[in-house]
Amino acid sequence: MQATIEGLCSAAGATYTLTPIHQIPPLVNDAHWSQRVVEIASQRGLGTRVRAIDEMPTMGAEDFAFYLQRTPGCFFFVGNGADSVYLHNDRYDFNDDILEVAAGVHVAIVDEILGLPSSQ
């Protein structure tokens, strides 16, 4: 960014000052919890609908990164179906059919952490 701004300003005979206003850390999942989320989902019968990915499908900043700096965890995407436009698109339409799977994964994780039998 610095080089781009410098080049544009130089070409226009302008000057600039670049001051970062807010910095959000990179979101880095804990390897153990990433694996556990997939395992828990699989053990609770959701395995065919849950998968691990090694890339972040977005470059957006995420506040959850601050939590992960303090405690191990796993940020995961719920998804919206194969034929959906991406989130923050004016044609986005929430797929209500994913609610059971999304809630099921969260409940299964809580059950596991608390040592409770499966809620499903």
Image: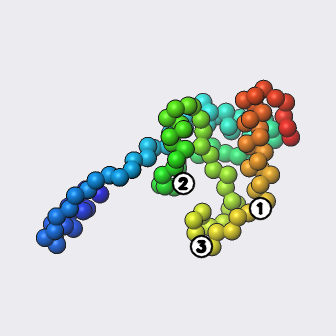
Viewer-proximal residue among 1 and 67: 67
Question: In this orientation, does residue 47 appear?
Answer: no
Q: Which residue, given by chain and number where applicable, does mark 3 sit on?
A: 90
Side of 70 where 119 appears, left or right: right
- Looking at the image, is 59 positioned above or below residue 119? below
Q: Residue at x 16, y 68 (%)?
A: 14
Depth check, front residue: 80 or 55: 80
Q: Position of residue 6 (x, y in %)?
A: 20, 61
Crowdedness of circle 3 by 10 Å Cα count: few (<14), some, many (20+)?
few
Marks 3 and 2, how far apart in space? 18 Å
Say which residue appears at 35% left-offset and 52% top-offset: 21
Residue 42 horizontal/vertical position (percent): 75, 39
Which quarter of the figure is the N terminus placed in?
bottom left
Q: With 76 as the anchor, is 107 left or right in this view?
A: right
Q: Looking at the rendered structure, which numbered label has been put on residue 80?
A: none
**Res. 111 image quadrant:** top right
Q: Residues within 10 Å of mark 2 (few under 14, many from 20)?
A: few
Q: Amino acid at mark 1?
A: Asp
Residue sitting at the far top: 115
Q: Pointer 1: residues within 10 angstroms few (<14), some, or many (20+)?
A: few
Q: What residue does disc 2 label?
A: 57
Q: Earlier in the sequence, mark 3 or mark 1?
A: 3
- Check disc 1 and report the residue beneath it: 96
- Look at label 3 and name its amino acid: Asp
Secondary structure found at label 1: helix
Mark in front: 3 vs 2: 3
Whole-angstrom CA distance, mark 1 to mark 2, is 22 Å
